[in-house]
């Protein structure tokens, strides 16, 4: 019997109110899956088990007497085993949370504020970039108009070169989107 089975047998699966609750902490029978959502679900399930164990500990401690010392130790052992299980499962998850989110939580604020601030910042930067792009388009248009008045032949040859280059680029892009079997790659719509 491994340590997780010992802990399960030792706790007897007893709930806080004397009801037997089956508990399984054995992760040896679990097949390893590289699906990020499945890994995250396993961590979430482990967190739920830990919360249940903490609640059981709370009930045991709140009505503590000499006879409840053994169940208290058993529940503590089960909690330690489940925390270890969660740590092992969490190693398969690659989630990065910005420190600003933790700071907001520590300050008692809603982490959605961080998301809102990041989105507002992106919108502001996007507007600035769009303004710059529009300015350069207008400058290019103005320069072409001025050059066309002064050098009409050169501007005409420039436009022909640009059109040929654009059609070649488009042809290459279409060729790259054709699969070896002749099918076209289709971008999925969101």
Image (cartoon, rainbow, N blue to C red):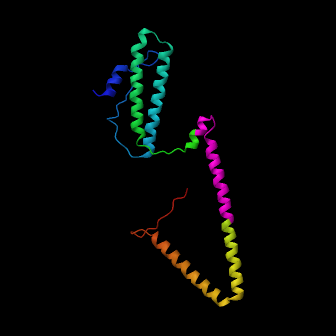
68 versus 163 height, above or below: above
Give the quadrant of the C terminus: bottom right
* Region in magenta: 103-131
Identify the residue at horizontal 57%, vertical 84% (top origin).
161
Residue 189 in which image quadrant: bottom right
Q: Position of residue 167 (x, y in %)?
A: 54, 78
140 versus 131 height, above or below: below
31 versus 129 height, above or below: above
Horizontal side, residue 3 vs residue 15: left or right: left
Q: Position of residue 176 (x, y in %)?
A: 45, 70
Identify the residue at horizontal 71%, vertical 83% (top origin).
146
Q: Position of residue 79 (x, y in %)?
A: 42, 26
Identify the residue at horizontal 65%, vertical 59% (top origin).
126
Q: Taken as a whole, is the magenta stretch helix, strand or loop?
A: helix
Residue 21 visible within the image: no
Residue farthest to the bottom, as pictured: 153
Q: How many callouts does the rendering have?
A: 0
Q: Position of residue 89 (x, y in %)?
A: 40, 38
Identify the residue at horizontal 39%, vertical 23% (top origin).
77
Residue 87 visible within the image: yes
Give the quadrant of the N terminus: top left
Residue farthest to the left, as pictured: 1
Horizontal side, residue 105 vs residue 8: left or right: right
Assess whether residue 121 is covered by the magenta stretch. Answer: yes
Assess whether residue 34 is covered by the magenta stretch. Answer: no
Horizontal side, residue 91 vs residue 111: left or right: left
183 versus 116 height, above or below: below
Q: Nearer the viewer, residue 90 or 32?
A: 90
């Amino acid at each position: 019997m491994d340590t997780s089975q010992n802990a399960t047998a030792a706790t007897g699966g007893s709930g806080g109110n004397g009801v037997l609750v089956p508990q399984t902490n054995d992760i040896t029978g679990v097949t390893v899956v590289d699906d990020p959502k499945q890994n995250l679900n396993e961590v979430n399930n482990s967190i739920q088990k830990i919360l249940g164990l903490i609640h059981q500990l709370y009930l045991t401690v709140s009505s503590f007497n000499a006879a409840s010392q053994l169940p208290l130790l058993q529940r503590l052992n089960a909690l330690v085993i489940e925390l270890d299980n969660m740590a092992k499962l969490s190693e398969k998850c690659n989630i990065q949370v910005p420190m600003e989110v933790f700071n907001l939580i520590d300050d008692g604020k809603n982490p959605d504020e961080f998301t809102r601030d990041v989105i507002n910042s992106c919108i502001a930067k996007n507007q600035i970039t769009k303004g710059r792009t529009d300015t350069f388009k207008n400058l290019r248009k103005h320069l072409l108009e001025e050059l066309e008045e002064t050098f009409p032949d050169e501007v005409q040859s420039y436009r022909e070169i640009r059109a040929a280059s654009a059609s070649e680029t488009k042809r290459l892009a279409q060729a790259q989107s054709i699969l070896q079997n002749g099918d076209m790659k289709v971008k999925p719509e969101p």
